[in-house]
Amino acid sequence: MNKYINYVIGIVSLSGGGKTALTNKLIEKIEDSTPVYFDEYDDFTTHPPMETWSNEDINYNDWKFPRLIFDLQSLKAGIDIAHPLTKTTVKANKFIIFDAAFGRANDELNQLIDLMVYIDTPLDVAMGRRILRGIENKEFDTLNSIKEDVEIYINRARQAYLIGDKAMRPRSDLVLDGTLTLEQLGKQVIQKLESKI
């Protein structure tokens, strides 16, 4: 007998691909849903040095996130959790919308995701979005800080994203066009969800 009563919808994309925005849109559209954001578990995660992540031998199982795994298991089992940052109560609603950085490329996360959605966003669009977001959030306060970010992308991050695409896309149940509007993306996810359950 399956010990889980709730359903996890994983949303994954490359950085700047729109996974957080789509997660938030689905929370608006799907009743009885709860968001879980991978980035909010940074303090509870261990991983290899980031500079090694442009290597073809990358192993997503080298990342360890026991708190995230525990919280997802609890929510799936219908048990409320404490938010990792604010400590407020997070309700174990029927649908858990998981902003999932690795999709199913990590074996532990794979076991907890019921529907995996990959947003296929062109790298140039994703890069443009990251720069605009950085300016808007005041992460980039000078032209030099933008220059440094672009250099990191060219020298290391782009290769890591291409490797990530190969690992995540084939393991997804639904691949979306990341240049579509959030409204269009949300509708496609809901249609797929309805066909599954």
Image (cartoon, rainbow, N blue to C red):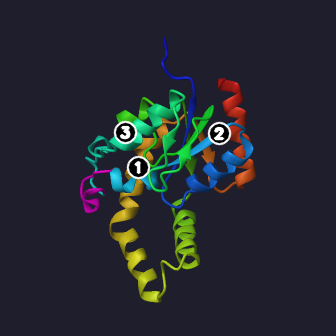
| Residue 49 on image: x %, y % | 24, 59
Decide: few, some or many residues near mark 1? Use Cα within 10 Å; few <14, some 14-19, many ≥20. Answer: many
Whether pointer 2 and pointer 1 mark residues with C-beta atoms closer than 8 Å, the reply is no
What residue sits right under mark 3 in the picture? 106
Magenta region: 45-53
Q: Is residue 23 above or below residue 70?
A: below
Q: Nearer the viewer, mark 2 or mark 1?
A: 2
Which disc, if any, is residue 164? Answer: 1
Task: Residue type at mark 2: give it.
Answer: Ser
* First reached walking from the N terminus: tag 3 or tag 1: 3
| Res 54 → quadrant | bottom left
Task: Determine if the magenta segment contains residue 129.
Answer: no
Q: Residue at x 58, y 30 (%)?
A: 7
Task: Determine if the magenta segment contains residue 49.
Answer: yes
The CA distance from mark 3 to mark 1 is: 11 Å
Apparent side of residue 56 relative to residue 176 in the rendered image (left or right): left
Closest to the observer: 119 or 9?
Answer: 9
Decide: few, some or many residues near mark 2? Use Cα within 10 Å; few <14, some 14-19, many ≥20. Answer: many
| Res 18 → quadrant | bottom right
Q: Secondary structure at mark 2?
A: strand
Q: Nearer the viewer, mark 3 or mark 2?
A: 2
| Residue 141 on image: x %, y % | 49, 86
Q: Nearer the viewer, mark 3 or mark 1?
A: 3
Q: Residue at x 66, y 23 (%)?
A: 197
Which disc, if any, is residue 33? Answer: 2
Q: Residue at x 41, y 56 (%)?
A: 161
Q: Secondary structure at mark 3?
A: loop
Task: Residue type at mark 3: give it.
Answer: Asn
Closest to the observer: 178 or 137?
Answer: 137
